[in-house]
Each structure stands twice: as structure tokens, then as C-alpha cells.
Amino acid sequence: MPIFPQEIIDIVIDELDSTGGKKSLSTVALVSRSLLPRAQFHLFRSVDVSLSPCRYEDANDWATFHTFLTKSRSIKSYVREVFMENIDDTYDSHFGSSWSCPDESHRDHRMTKAITQRLSTRKMECVSSVLQLLPRLEAIRLNYGTQPRTTWPHILGDVGVGGRNVLTRFGFEQSMRSLILCSVKGVPITVMDSILGLSQLTTLVFDNIVLEGEVPIPSWPQKSCLTNLHTVGFVYMTCSYASSRHNLSRLVNLIISTASHTIRKLIWSTRSEDPPAIQSLHNLQVFSTVTRRPYYLATAQPILEQIIASQQKMHPLKTLEFFGMESYHGSILYGADIVKARRAWKGFDDLLEDEAFSKVKEVRLLFSDFTGSNLGRVITRSNTMPAAYELYTTKEVMSGFKASLSKATRRGVVFTSGLTYGRDGLVSRY
């Protein structure tokens, strides 16, 4: 990972002054301790935390940031947003007793499971302490951009006996407006009960979440105070025991029904025999779902059918959003697979002709990244089965989908692209 000289960092940050003489740096990315001494002179509102390849440096960064906030008299009261990418670093794919640091500039660091665990514990203690130092925090995005699920205690610690509201110890239960929880397993039901009590929330997204094991029905939340939600999302959310999945459906419907008059955006990508009842969402403007191969619109179909069935009761949609588009950058396409893909999207194009979607003016395609934008194309042939391994650019993927939805295109629907995660991602607009 390239490292800028400290002199360049200082010059760039010092130049971020407004004409009135006030420091105008609004977002700090915690990727280097060298950034913090200069950042303390700016009243920044957002902190974007990315995982450092070096576990030592990652733990030290958090410790330094904690010290920085502790000594600052004003900064901690200005911070409103914290974005934490992959905060659990205990997952490693190494099978040996020790291995070199992933950061090429720190190859002298030798890592073991014991060292990794110790550094992770130190880091998570700092994370917990940092959150407690931000009394006016309004938005948190935890653990986004990671594949392996993190165990709940590695996120915010154990709930403890009688800990009804685990969030209260952080002191922002009254200020929190946006909560996005990603890639966590073993989430206690008591935590869900705490979240459902945050009446001021306007954004709530669960992405790749597994609730704790078998829990008696009386222990599940029976009441939701989420009456101000504008954006709500359930992406690959499930329970570790099949017997509890019906209760999960009840929980989803409880959240949706409580905020039925305020929800503007619904994110749904959870395969379920009992999809959420959305007939009461009179103000729904954006529906977001996954299109990743080979499922295509399998998770979205029940919702789309509900929208058609209740078209007289719902505010017409304006935007349809699809994430997982990066799976189309590179694919091994066989004859039957190509036919299936075209059939799926032709069916969707026909679906959009229904009166329920008459006000849809935008189809937004979201990618995990735009690395495919510079890919070339390689075609290979097999003697046993004709197949093509094709690397599509982002522009080609966009063009392909636009061509597949020819009826929507003729009707004036606009196709746009964006990132699944990041400021313009899953919860960007409604």
C-alpha cells in the first residue's frame, strides 16, 4: 500500500482552509497515525475507519485515535458519523503456526493466532472506548465490506446478565439516527430489543446478520418504537436455528408495520417463504434488492408481485435499485445460463409494464467496486461444452442491462450506477 510522505500530508490538510479562516476538513480517514496530529485542528464531522493490513498498526491507530479524542476538548462533540470497515481482524486464512505481516512494508512482523487475538482484544477495547467519547454520534456503519461474519462480542462486547439495552452504555441512544450493522453472527435478541427502542432512528439496515440460537417466543421483541424510519433494510438476515425463522419473519413485519407511513426506501434480499407484508407502505419510493447470479430476481419476485397486487394502495415507486452487479464483471457463461439470464431480465422488463411501476423513472445498478471498468475481454472455448469466459467492463454491464430492458428504455427509464457501500451506496437516497 503506497504511503505519502508526512510533508505532503501536512501540506494537503493545511490547505483545507475556508476563506473565513476556519478549518474545513469534514471527513477523516483513519489509515495513518500521521494524519491525526493535523486533523485535530479541524472540526470534522465524519470518521472513516479502514482496516490496516498490519495488525500492529491497526491496533495502534485505534489507541492513538482514542488518546486524541480524550485530550481534545471540542472534536468529540463535533463528530456525527463513524464508518468502520471490517473491524474484526481475528479472521485469517493462514494455516501455519506463524506468518508474515500482510503489509509488505512490515515484513519483519511475525503473526501468530495468539498475537492476532491479543491485538484484536486491544483494538476492540479502544473501539468501545471511542464510541463512548462521542456523545452526539448520529450515524454508525459497523463492519461493512467484509465476507466472514464476526461474532457479536467482537463488535460491542457481551450483553451481560440483565443488560436490556446494551446501547445505553455508549450514551448516544438519544442522538442516533442511522444504524447499519453488517456481517455479524450470534446477535443477541436483547440487542434487537434495544435497537427497536431507538425511536429517533431514520435508517436501519441489517446486512448479512445471523441472530443467536433457539430463543423462546416470549423473548423476541413484541413492540417497536421505530416510527420515524425512512430507510429499512434486511440483506441476508437469518437465524442460526430453522425453528426461529418464523419469529424472524414476525420481527421483520413488526418493524415494517410500525414505520409503514414513514418508510421511503426498502432494501430486501433475504430468501424467505414468508416475505414482508408491504401493502401498507403508502410512501415507498425506492425498492432495492440483489441481482447476483445465479439467483437473478428470485428474492425480489415476491415483493414485486405484492407491489402489483396492491397498486391502488401504495404510492408508486420512482426508483428500482439492484446491488450485486459486480458478479456480472466476470462470469463463466454456458448456453443454458445465458438463456436463463436473458429470460429473467426479459420477464422483469415485462413486469415493469404493469401500471404499478408506471412512475419508475430510474433503475440504479450498484457494484461493490468499479475494478471491472478497466477489464479487457478474454474468450476461451472448451471441447466438451461451448463456453465463454468473459470479463465485462462496468460500462458493458450497464449497456447489457439497458438492452435487456428495452421496453423500460423506450419508456424513458434512466439507468445509473453507483457503489453498494460508501456514501453513495445502499442507503444513499430515497
Image (cartoon, rainbow, N blue to C red):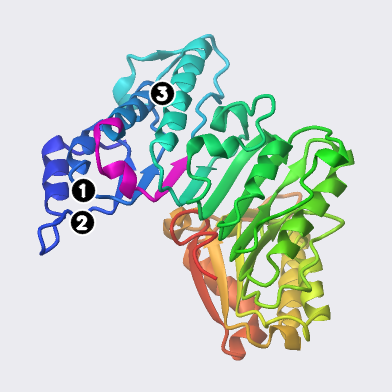
Dot 2 falls on a residue whose secondary structure is: loop
Q: Earlier in the sequence, mark 2 or mark 1?
A: 2
Residue at the disc numbered 1: 42
Residue 24 at x, y percent in the picture:
20, 56
Q: What residue sits right under mark 2 in the picture?
A: 24
Q: Earlier in the sequence, mark 1 or mark 3?
A: 1
Residue that sits furthest to the right in the current view:
243
Circle nearer the N terminus (2, 3):
2
- State the residue position of label 3: 55
Q: Residues within 10 Å of mark 2 (few under 14, many from 20)?
A: some
The answer to whether the residues at label 2 and label 1 have Cβ atoms under 8 Å apart is: yes
The C terminus: image quadrant: bottom right
Spatial separation of the CA atoms under disc 2 and disc 1: 6 Å
**Mark whose residue sits in front, 1 or 3:** 1
> Which stretch did the figure color magenta?
70-85
Which amino acid type is shown beneath numbered disc 1?
His
Residue 226 locus on image (x, y percent): 65, 58
Tag 2: residue type? Ser
For the point 45% across and 54% down, the residue is 422
Judging from the image, what secondary structure is the residue with disc 1 in? Answer: loop
Q: Quadrant of the N terminus?
A: top left
Rendered position, 196 above or below 321: above
Q: Amino acid at mark 3?
A: Arg
Residue 126: image quadrant is top left
Could you tell me which residue is drawn at 70 percent across and 37 percent down? 190
